[in-house]
Image (cartoon, grey):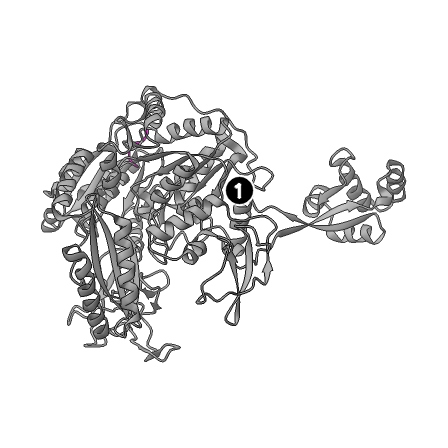
Amino acid sequence: MQYPPVGVRVLVPLGRKTITGVVYRSHEGALPDTVKLREVMDVLDEQPVVTAYQLRLWEWLSQYYMCTMGEVMAAALPSGIIDDDYKALTTQYVQLNPTHLDPRQQELTLSLLSRAKSQQKLLETFLAMGNGQLTMVERRVLLEASGVGSAVLRTMMDKGIFCEQERAVSRLRHYIGETHTPHSLDAQQHRAVEQIRQSWQQKPVTLLHGVTSSGKTEVYIHLIHEMLQQGKQVLYLVPEIALTTQLTDRLQAVFGDQVVVYHSRFSSDERVEIYSSLLPIASSPARLILGARSAVFLPFSNLGLVIVDEEHEPSYKQQDPAPRYHARSAAIMMAQWYGAKVLLGTATPSIESYHNAVSGKYGWVEMTERFRGLQLPKITMVDLQRQYHRKEMYGHLADPVVFRMREELARGKQVILFQNRRGYAPFLQCPQCGEVPKCPNCDVSLTYHKTNNTLVCHSCGYTHSPLSNRGASISPQGVHYPIYNAHCPQCGTAWKLRGIGTERLEEEIHGLFPHARVARMDLDSTRKKDAYQQIIDRFAQHEVDILIGTQMVTKGLHFDGVSLVVVLQADSLINQPDFRSAEHAFQMLEQVSGRAGRTGTTGEVMIQTFDTKNPLFTLLSKHDYRGLYEQQVSEREMFCFPPFHRLIVLSLRHRDERRLERSSELLMEALKKVFGARVSGVITPLVSRRQNQHIRQLRLRVEQGANVQRAKQLLRAELDAFLRQSDGKGTVVAIDVDPQ
């Protein structure tokens, strides 16, 4: 029997449906009686569209993150490949009829068109494009170059002079600018490159710990240049799509058309074309791939280097749906199979990566100084208790902050305001009875967005107009949703806005600085495909004086004119019910502070807080990451958290809360019989209901040195047994390995 090759797509029947699958393995010999075979209906590819390396990665992800191969495939392949609905982009081309290819015939035709000047001009333009050697021209280009209308072209086609042909064209953008060799390195950068090379001789993974604005990107560029000269491919991972904007321009200026960008903001058809351009069967596979976490799934053939920039970022971890993978871990495993090197770069390493570097598992290179000797920004704490007591506040900005902003704007400098809450107000509240409008589907308050006058759930996306008086609302499922109009439904008192989001902050800034040019960068203002690019370009070109943003503004962006960064509600970053809260808060605040003073004079960061004596702020004011690490690693070892224990979180979901409580207790008891004290009691998370499903959690801690794979096998067996029981039926269990 002739089996389809591994890695090709096939159509198979599944119930009444026909689905697309990928051949993973061929089975030889007799099958068990319990296995029901289904015939392959059709083989869709002549050559594999999934490589052996990719299948190996899928298998590892499935085993490590405890999900199915099908879930991995759904995440790994562009939907246009899975659904087989890719449509090529076509355009119309104009060509001469065969009878007019002879130069003498062309001269005769031109003379016959002497009275039809527009037709004559169109033919002359066509012949001039390519010095008479060109036989086909894009229709749009020809009409623009000749300056005549499409009616003229149709007339000449009727005469048999021209004909049209539809051809497929690439959606990939080509770089048309000039390129230059990598810039020369300063002493620190040169030393870092040499140390990285030496480190790779002993350890394939190296952590580059460089302070903000130390010139890490230029180090990356030199290492990329070396790899490309060796004929190798390079994967450059970034945590946010926004970061690809500046990086693309910078990389293309050196590497030109070798740069390919890949992320989820591209259409399905665009992603299919990028994916196909990397297949081994492609005529010239792309060499340098810049992308977000999903880029690890691309079909590399000759990978030599993986760069994980801002490796500490939680954005590298997929949350929902499965596979809940970490792109950094996946990249390290993938590089190992290719024999490629890995460089993890950041100013604020994750505790796990720094621990691996300190313990000798990873190589470790440091860059302790900013590029060209610039000083790290000055950190100033603004005591909100004192400011409110003295009534020295301008809305949500303290008087010293407003004063410094006015000074910097007068100097022609730019300011970044960091507020990690989008919308106008985080919630509404009745001042009389305390009622807060909540999402009918989730256990969270609704955020008010003034721009479109809606209350929005930032968990499930539910929206509602709070100023509507339409009466009772009924969903398509027949569920009665509450209507929140201008007044509290309990006592009739008018709502009060509580807290501040980026929308409201933007409004206040316009009032305080009426002549300043203000822009906002958050999820709401960047929904369109090119919105990131436009905002970043405007700010970089000094067309914006004040940039207001969420965590988008904290990550790796370079702006020459920023001298002042203001953090509005730092306390909300620190006081999170999570063992990583101090780590994440330090990383976010240190990263956003790094946007200030990247050229010229020393920048300043002003942090508004009610708790100026918090130890975290003391460490931050000294830019003391090592102090943070030592503090955190001591606590985590004591309380059995990563990096000393592996953590697996089980999230149980059910519409019936009582049934969920019972099933959670039963599963906990079953797991404790196997794992003992490694299993926590049932935890009710801070958000205990999402999309009408109640949530409970269990945590399994596995100490370092234990057989983690065996622990996962035992856990899977217990889960399967639980879900087969009557108490487990209807309960959805999501497994999160190494939660961030």
User: Dot 1: what SS?
Assistant: helix
In the image, 487 versus 717, the foreground residue is 717
Q: Vertically, is 381 above or below 269?
A: above
How would you classify the magenta stretch by its main secondary structure? loop
Q: Which residues are magenta?
A: 595-599
Residue visible at 33% across and 55% down in the picture: 66
In the image, 307 versus 23, the foreground residue is 23
Where residue 64 appears, as percent x and y from the top left, is: 33, 50
Where residue 144 appears, as percent x and y from the top left, is: 68, 44
In the image, what residue type sits under mark 1? Leu
Q: Vertically, is 280 above or below 475?
A: above
Q: Is residue 570 visible?
A: no
Instruction: Say left or right for 194 vs 154.
Output: left
Instruction: Say left or right for 613 vs 548.
Output: left
Residue visible at 22% across and 46% down in the picture: 706
Q: Is residue 221 magenta?
A: no
Q: Is residue 165 visible?
A: yes
Q: Vertically, is 149 above or below 303?
A: below
Q: Which residue is mark 1?
A: 278
In the image, 697 versus 204, the foreground residue is 204
Where residue 692 appears, as percent x and y from the top left, is: 30, 71
Residue visible at 30% across and 49% down in the picture: 550
Q: Vertically, is 728 above or below 230?
A: below
